Amino acid sequence: MTRSLPSGARLGRVMRAALFYTVLRFGLFIVVFGLLWVAGARSILLLGLAILISGVISYFALNSQRSAMSGAISRRITDFRDRLDAGARAEDDD
C-alpha cells in the first residue's frame, strides 16, 4: 500500500506519527508537572519526578501510538533500503 504513495506522502505519514506521539508525551508531562506542582513539589524534585512519572505512564498508556510511530519509521527505512538495492542492481546491470 505505501509503495504506491509518493515519497513525500510516506515521509508525511512518518512525521505525523512522530509528531502525534511527541505531542502526547509532552502533554502527559505537563499534566504530571501540574499535578505535582499542586501537590507541593518544587525545584529539581518537581522536574525529576515529572519526567520519571510521565515516562512510566507513557510507557503503558501510549503503547499503541509508540507502535504506530515505530512501524511508520520502520516502513520508511525498509522502503529506502529497497530503493537503494534497486538502484545498485540497476547499476550492476549497466
Image (spheres, rainbow, N blue to C red):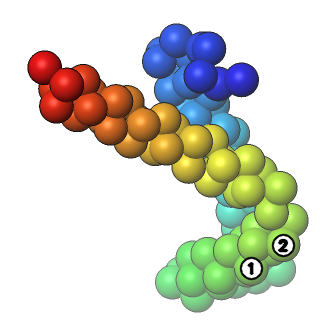
Amino acid identity at mark 1? Val
The residue lying at 19 percent from left, 25 percent from top is: 93
The residue lying at 86 percent from left, 65 percent from top is: 61
- The numbered dot on residue 69 is none
Image coordinates of residue 28 in percent, x first then y, are 76, 59
Please rate how many residues cluster around mark 2, counting C-alpha atoms within 10 Å: few if below 14, some from 14 to 19, many from 20. Answer: few
Whether residues under marks 1 and 2 lie with C-beta atoms below 8 angstroms apart, the answer is yes
Q: Please state if 52 lies on the left or on the right of 28 as rendered.
A: left
The residue lying at 82 percent from left, 80 percent from top is: 39
Image coordinates of residue 13 in percent, x first then y, are 62, 27
Residue at image mark 2: 60
Q: Nearer the viewer, residue 43 or 53?
A: 53
Q: How many marks?
A: 2
Q: Please state if 37 lies on the left or on the right of 73 as rendered.
A: right
Image coordinates of residue 45 in percent, x first then y, are 58, 87
Q: Nearer the viewer, residue 34 or 76?
A: 76
Q: Which quarter of the figure has residue 49?
A: bottom right
Q: Return the residue found at the far bottom.
A: 45
The residue lying at 61 percent from left, 75 percent from top is: 51
Please rate how many residues cluster around mark 1, counting C-alpha atoms within 10 Å: few if below 14, some from 14 to 19, many from 20. Answer: few
Q: Nearer the viewer, residue 18 or 79?
A: 79
Image coordinates of residue 46 in percent, x first then y, are 62, 80
Image quadrant holding the N terminus, namely: top right
Amino acid identity at mark 2? Phe
Image: 7 above or below 30: above
What kind of element bears circle 1?
A: helix
| Residue 35 visible at all | no
Nearer to us of marks 1 and 2 is: 2
Q: Which quarter of the figure has residue 58?
A: bottom right
Q: Give the CA distance from mark 1 to mark 2.
A: 7 Å
Residue at image mark 1: 56
